[in-house]
Amino acid sequence: MKIEGEEYRALWFDENIVNFIDQRELPYKFEIFKAKTVDDVAFAIRDMVVRGAPAIGAAAVYGMVLGEKEMEKTAEKLRKTRPTAYDLFYAIEYMIENINEGKDAFDAASTYVEDIINRCKKIGENGDKLIKNGMNILTHCNAGALATVDYGTALAPMRIAHKKGKKIFVYADETRPRCQGLLTSWELMQEGIAHSVIADNAAGYFMKKGEIDMVIVGADRIVKNGDFANKIGTYEKAVLAKENNIPFYVAAPISTFDNTIKNGNKIIIEERGRVELAKINKKKIMPDWMNVKNPAFDVTPKRFVTGYITEEGIIKK
Ligand code: MRU
């Protein structure tokens, strides 16, 4: 991704340090977080310095390089960071297989990261075919380059459509409590793609007015029957899209598809801390006595999905 004229990835490995664009600080400050140990990488995933399923997977492969000498211990530490994104577990297993086969850990990690970037690019090319000139597209959370190392999943088709000269407009859900919609807006601004951030509870309003032609979201885990977990609020957007006859697409690479789980009821949903609701941009917005509940994801049943945009093509029901 281009940031003020310079090419960046969401994370990269250099001289035994994993460098992350610190997503906790964006869009206000552009800072690099340096992880020198496995514990630092685990912290970066848990605290959401890095976030988004494919980017979490990439962080994990680099974490496995740092902790190669204690492979099982490292794998266990990383597995415990965030439970919902399947890419994390897929990436750790990939590294264990490669290390056990005697392959160089750094080479294996680099191959994984290049591969995920290429897969996202293909998702973009495949998804672009669905986008017509003049379309208004709604997305939820951030499934862009920040969430995937580069290109993105849900944002990749929009990037490619825009590069091809199609005129599009993006509605970016704010995505409380962590406001990943602001990351989406920041990425779209870098790309020069026209967009507006909308409050999460405004999506139905715009859909009913006929202002949304299509919804594209990412996924944290897509299970065998097609149900999928994604950022909290995705489910209600899918229901609203169906009610308003708007096509609803899920964009994800193979590393997000979990064939070990039969249906969405079995997906573990991460519960996160109170502070995410109680503060915005480090500023308190609730008194301390207020109790909150903060599930980070929800599950959308497959019947709400028009199709899955993958690197191998578009899978319709
Ligand atoms: O909690 P987050 O910010 O890691 O959640 C991210 C999402 O829900 C994304 O939509 C998903 O990981 C797909 S990213 C390409």
Image: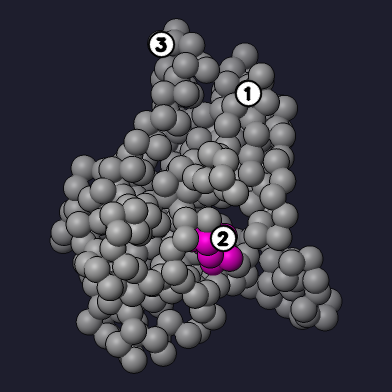
Is residue 204 placed above or below 41 in the rendered structure?
below
Q: Residue furthest top?
A: 102
Question: Marks 1 and 3: which is nearer the front?
Answer: 1
Residue that mark 3 sits on: 101
Residue that mark 1 sits on: 14
User: Which of the two discs, 3 and 2, labels the residue nearer the N terminus?
Assistant: 3
- The quadrant holding residue 266 is bottom left
User: Which of the two discs, 1 and 3, labels the residue nearer the N terminus?
Assistant: 1
**Gap between marks 1 and 3, in whole Å?**
24 Å
Residue 195 visible in image: yes
Residue 47 visible in image: no
Write the residue at 24% across / 72% down.
Answer: 247
Callout 3 secondary element: loop
Is residue 312 rendered magenta in the image?
no
Name the amino acid type tagged 2.
Trp
Write the residue at 18% across / 54% down.
Answer: 315
Callout 2 secondary element: helix
Q: Which residues are magenta?
A: 181-189
